[in-house]
């Protein structure tokens, strides 16, 4: 699970995609994407992710491969990406917080969940769960 707001800081691309050995990096480090190879990467609150990282995720979904930071070689990765947003994706697109190509690649099976706030006012419907 990745909280996209944690990826707003400097070094976020290296944390997500890993980095090659080089100046300031004494050894190669694998990122969260490679750690999820063969499985699922869950991105929470996708709108909090920087546009440059959204672009890299989109490219990963398109090609099934990525580049580590400082790398010149494409690294194949077999990963399924599941993402969540706090607002409807269409509103994020209009506000410029979600890149259209990423939305297109992730929108294969959208699932809309009811918010907790909505359920608080429906005590009759939730008594069986309490």
Image (spheres, helix red, strand yellow):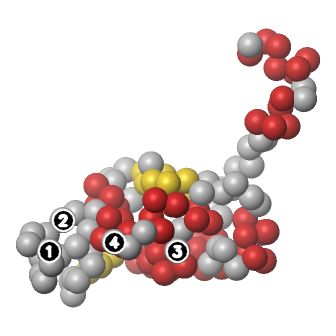
Q: Are marks 4 and 3 in contact (CB under 8 Å)?
A: no
Residue at (45% x, 54% y) in the render? 2
Q: Residue 15, percent across and down? A: 32, 65
Q: Vertical placement of 51 versus 30: above or below?
A: below
How many marks do you count on the picture? 4
Separation of marks 2 and 1 at Cα, in angstroms: 9 Å
Q: Are marks 2 and 1 in contact (CB under 8 Å)?
A: yes
Furthest residue toward bottom: 72
Which quadrant of the view contains residue 73?
Answer: bottom left
Residue at numbered disc 1: 25
Q: Secondary structure at mark 1?
A: loop
Mark 4 vs 1, N-terminal side: 4
Residue at numbered disc 2: 29
Q: Vertical placement of 58 versus 87: above or below?
A: below
Task: Name the quadrant of the C terminus.
Answer: top right
Mark 4 vs 3, N-terminal side: 4
Residue at (33% x, 58% y) in the render? 32
Does residue 70 appear left or right of residue 95 in this picture?
Answer: left
Q: Secondary structure at mark 3?
A: loop
Comparing marks 4 and 2, which lies closer to the viewer?
A: 4
Residue at numbered disc 3: 50
Q: Are marks 3 and 2 in contact (CB under 8 Å)?
A: no
Observer able to see residue 71: yes
Residue at numbered disc 4: 11
């Amino acid at each position: 699970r990745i909280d996209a707001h944690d990826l707003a800081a400097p070094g976020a691309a290296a944390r997500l995609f890993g980095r090659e050995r080089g100046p300031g990096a004494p050894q190669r480090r694998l990122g969260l994407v490679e750690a999820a190879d063969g499985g699922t990467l869950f991105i929470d609150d996708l709108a909090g992710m920087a546009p440059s990282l959204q672009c890299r995720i989109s490219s990963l979904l398109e090609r099934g491969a990525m580049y580590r930071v400082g790398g010149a070689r494409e690294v194949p990765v077999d990963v399924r990406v599941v993402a969540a947003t706090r607002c409807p994706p269409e509103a994020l697109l209009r506000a410029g917080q979600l890149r259209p190509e990423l939305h297109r690649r992730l929108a294969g099976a959208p699932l809309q969940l009811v918010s907790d706030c909505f359920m608080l006012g429906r005590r009759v419907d939730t008594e069986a769960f309490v």
